[in-house]
Image (tube, rainbow, N blue to C red):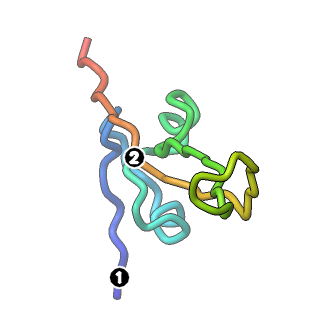
Amino acid sequence: MTIKARPCKRCRAEIPVERIEAMPQTQLCIKCSEAVGGEWDYHFANENIGKAGSLKKNYGGISVQKTRRQIEPLDDR
C-alpha cells in the first residue's frame, strides 16, 4: 500500500509521507502542529473505586480522554 502526501488542514502545505507513516491520523504539518500546540486535547480524571456513598476516596487509576482540537484554516492574506 502506497501512502500519499496530503495537504495540511491549517496551511495547506504538503504533509511529508514520513509524518503520515508515523502518525496516520495527522491532519497538520509539523510547523502548524507546533503553532497550535498539537492536534489533540487530553483530559485526565481520577477513577474512584470506593464503595458507593463512602466518603473515603480510593483512587484506583486515571482515565484519559483524547479529543481532536478544532483546527481553523489560515486566511490567504
- Quarter assignment of residue 42: top right
Task: Give the secondary structure at mark 1.
Answer: loop
User: For the view shown, which residue lies furthest in the front direction?
Assistant: 53
Which residue is nearer to you in this view: 54 or 27? Answer: 54
Q: Taking 44 as reference, is 18 above or below it? A: below
Residue pictured at 35% horizontal, 82% vertical = 2
Residue pictured at 25% horizontal, 18% vertical = 75
Around disc 1, counting alpha carbons within 10 Å, would you say few (fewer than 14), some (14 to 19), or many (20 or more)?
few
Give the Cα distance between marks 2 and 1. Answer: 26 Å
Point out which mark residue 2 bears.
Answer: 1
User: For the view shown, which residue lies furthest in the bottom direction?
Assistant: 1
Quadrant of the frame with the C terminus: top left
On the image, the x and y values in percent for residue 35 come to 54, 28
On the image, the x and y values in percent for residue 4 come to 33, 69
Q: Taking 17 as reference, is 48 above or below it? A: above
Point out which mark residue 56 bears.
Answer: none
The answer to whether residue 71 is left or right of residue 54 is left
The answer to whether residue 46 is left or right of residue 18 is right
Residue receiving disc 2: 68
- Quarter assignment of residue 25: bottom left
Amino acid tagged 1:
Thr
Task: Give the secondary structure at mark 2.
Answer: strand
Which residue is nearer to you in this view: 64 or 50? Answer: 50
Amino acid tagged 2:
Arg
The answer to whether residue 8 is left or right of residue 63 is left
Quadrant of the frame with the N terminus: bottom left
On the image, the x and y values in percent for residue 56 come to 75, 50
